Amino acid sequence: MLVISCIPAILVALAPIVSANFDLNVAIGDVATIFPWPDTIGIWALTDGDNPKCEDLAENGVIASWDEKNDLSHGREGIRCVPGNHCGYYHPDDDPWPSVELLEMHFTNNPLHHYTIYKDRGYTAPDGFTWLWPMYGVDGNTYGACHTDTRKSWDCNYNNDKLKLHGRRKFRCLTSITAKEINDAKRKGGKTAEDSEGYRNPDYPFFEVLSHNGTAIKPNGAAVAWTS
């Protein structure tokens, strides 16, 4: 853990880059199938600002999303949480504090957006209350800081309610990097065959939540329904 004397220096170092923020959300959803019952999916998703809309999440008809994985080496994209049973997207309304020790976020390879936050490397924010987790890149440099924040939840329906998502913010990251920047890179790159496993359904192509050539997801929801 960082000693008190280091905190002012860290805050000064962060000040030039903290000009924006993005929120890391978990979402669980139901997808219509050819059977009487729906399939359940879980995703991680990024949003900008306090009041995003459902159409922002599905900009250009595609939802940028990430799977939860145990290993993000060798270019694998996704989210890794330690311990995993306290940060999973199948428990979207759970609070990651105080159980989560580490969160690794490998969003894209080109350009590279791969960051890890560690609770035990954190420090207290100037408000004297918020615990900030430095956001480390694979080069060892810091690109901002994140803190847990689960006060906002949302619900979005797409394709005439064939896809229904319920999500909640888990972390807010203070950085010059925006959700739009990362989401656009993800949409441009699409998913690999490995990443798409579990999302493909030949009878309902909208089941492929993120695909380079998949059927577009057209939102039919209004503004995201926030709850405090």
Image: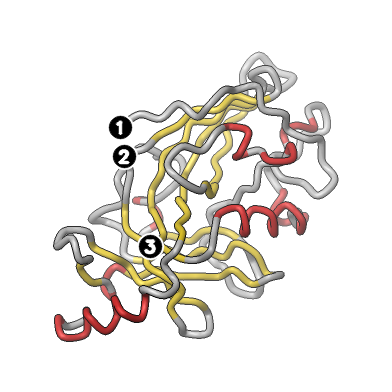
Q: Locate residue 79 relative to residue 85 in the image: left or right.
A: right
Q: Which element carries disc 3, helix, strand or loop?
A: strand
Q: What residue type is labelled 1?
A: Ser
Residue 219, percent from left and from top: 67, 27
Q: Quadrant of the N terminus?
A: bottom left
Which sits in the foreground, 61 or 117? 61
Looking at the rendered image, the disc whose residue lies closer to the viewer, 3 or 2, is 2
Dot 2: what SS? loop
The vertical placement of 122 against 39, above or below, is below
Residue 149: horizontal and vertical position, in percent?
Answer: 32, 48
For the residues bearing labels 2 and 1, Cβ distance under 8 angstroms: yes
Task: Return the x and y of residue 13 as percentages of the image width and height.
Answer: 35, 81
Q: Which residue is drawn at 68% across and 69% down?
A: 109
Q: In which quarter of the image is residue 107?
A: bottom right
Q: How far, Cα to Cα, is label 2 from label 1?
A: 5 Å
Residue behind mark 1: 228
Q: Nearer the viewer, residue 155 or 143?
A: 143
Amino acid type at image mark 2? Arg
Instruction: Determine which of the numbered discs, if any, sits on residue 2 in the image.
Output: none
Secondary structure of the residue carrying tag 1 is loop
On the image, numbered disc 2 is attached to which residue?
151
Q: Is residue 89 depicted above or below 223 in this figure?
A: below
Q: Position of 202 compared to 224: left or right? A: right
The residue to which callout 3 is attached is 82
Q: How far apart are marks 1 and 3 (CA)?
A: 26 Å
Displayed quadrant of residue 131: bottom left
Residue lying at 68% horizontally and 70% vertically, measured from the top left? 111
Q: How crowded is mark 1: few (under 14 residues within 10 Å), some or many (20 or more)?
A: few
